[in-house]
Amino acid sequence: QKEVEQDPGPLSVPEGAIVSLNCTYSNSAFQYFMWYRQYSRKGPELLMYTYSSGNKEDGRFTAQVDKSSKYISLFIRDSQPSDSATYLCAMKPGGTSYGKLTFGQGTILTVHP
Amino acid sequence: DTGVSQDPRHKITKRGQNVTFRCDPISEHNRLYWYRQTLGQGPEFLTYFQNEAQLEKSRLLSDRFSAERPKGSFSTLEIQRTEQGDSAMYLCASSLPGQATSDTQYFGPGTRLTVL
């Protein structure tokens, strides 16, 4: 079983929809949680960064972490065709500030006009 | 452009050949990571440098793989005797400790390797 599970989709939504992306994890040592966006044949780009539990909002994006359930989410409001990409969740343990990231498989999102 | 750069962007090679990739991190970033990403999967950690010291290596990094960061700036990843299973996107990331978002890793565009 992988440490981080993410539904690969694909997910197709109309423009303006609210998108919900999710990951579950098994390693209780994970303390730092990130969402990256990756366009086709490009490197991942950091979208959101959250430490421990709680919510974080940045424009149309909201990240939620529920450590008790080992579950993280990314919500995209008023989705746009330019949001079409693969969304990767990533996480790393606490204790030290550095360390390798463990990624989910990625969810492919298409927002159609 | 002040982001992470990687060279080459694409490499096609024949099985059994050696290949070398280069990564230039963001200026002053002292931490550098290598990841490998196969089609339909998330990136997988390969190795990590702090300055010139290689501090962690994944079990994925077989004896055919070697990485260096000789002066604590750019890094190279070499694959010897390539196999078809080595075909993947090789991603480099760099980070700087002490930022508010604690070691945020910024990724380069990747080097796509195809082994025929």
Image: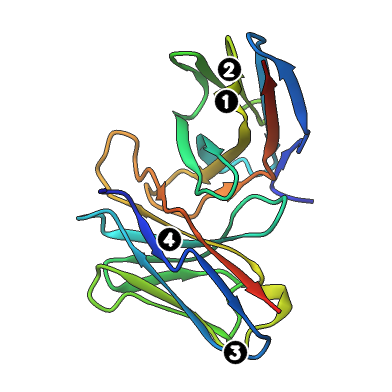
Look at the numbered discs 1 and 3 and tell me whether their residues touch, using CB distance below 8 Å: no
Residue A69 in view (yes/no): no
> Which label belongs to residue A80?
2
Which dot marks residue B33?
4
Residue B17 is marked as 3
Q: Is residue B20 above or below residue A54?
A: below
Q: Residue at x 58, y 11 (%)?
A: A77
Q: CA distance from mark 2 to mark 1?
A: 5 Å
Same subunit: marks 1 and 4: no
Could you tell me if the residues under marks 2 and 1 are in contact, i.e. CB atoms within 8 Å?
yes
Task: Depth check: give the residue in front, A97 or A83.
Answer: A83
Q: Earlier in the sequence, mark 3 or mark 4?
A: 3
**Of B97 and A13, the residue lying toward us:** A13
**Would residue B29 be visible to someone looking at this image?**
yes
Residue A3 position (above or below residue A37): below
Q: How far separated are the C-alphas under marks 1 and 4? A: 27 Å
Q: CA distance from mark 2 to mark 4?
A: 32 Å
Q: Amino acid at mark 2?
A: Gln
Residue lying at 46% horizontally and 53% vertically, measured from the top left:
B109
As measured in the structure, the alpha-carbon distance from the residue carrying label 1 to the one carrying label 3 is 39 Å
Q: Secondary structure at mark 2?
A: loop
Q: Secondary structure at mark 3?
A: loop
Q: Amino acid at mark 4?
A: Tyr
Q: Secondary structure at mark 4?
A: strand
Which of the pair A63/A26 is nearer the observer? Answer: A63
Q: Are marks 2 and 3 on the same chain?
A: no
Classify 10 Å Cα crowding around label 1: few (below 14), some (14-19), many (20 and above): some
User: Could you classify mark 4 by the number of other residues whose Cα lies within 10 Å: few (under 14), some (14-19), or many (20 or more)?
Assistant: many
Q: Where is mark 1, residue-wise? A: A83
Q: CA–CA distance between discs 3 and 4? A: 24 Å
Q: Is residue B49 left or right of residue B73?
A: right
Q: Position of residue A17 (x, y in %)?
A: 67, 10
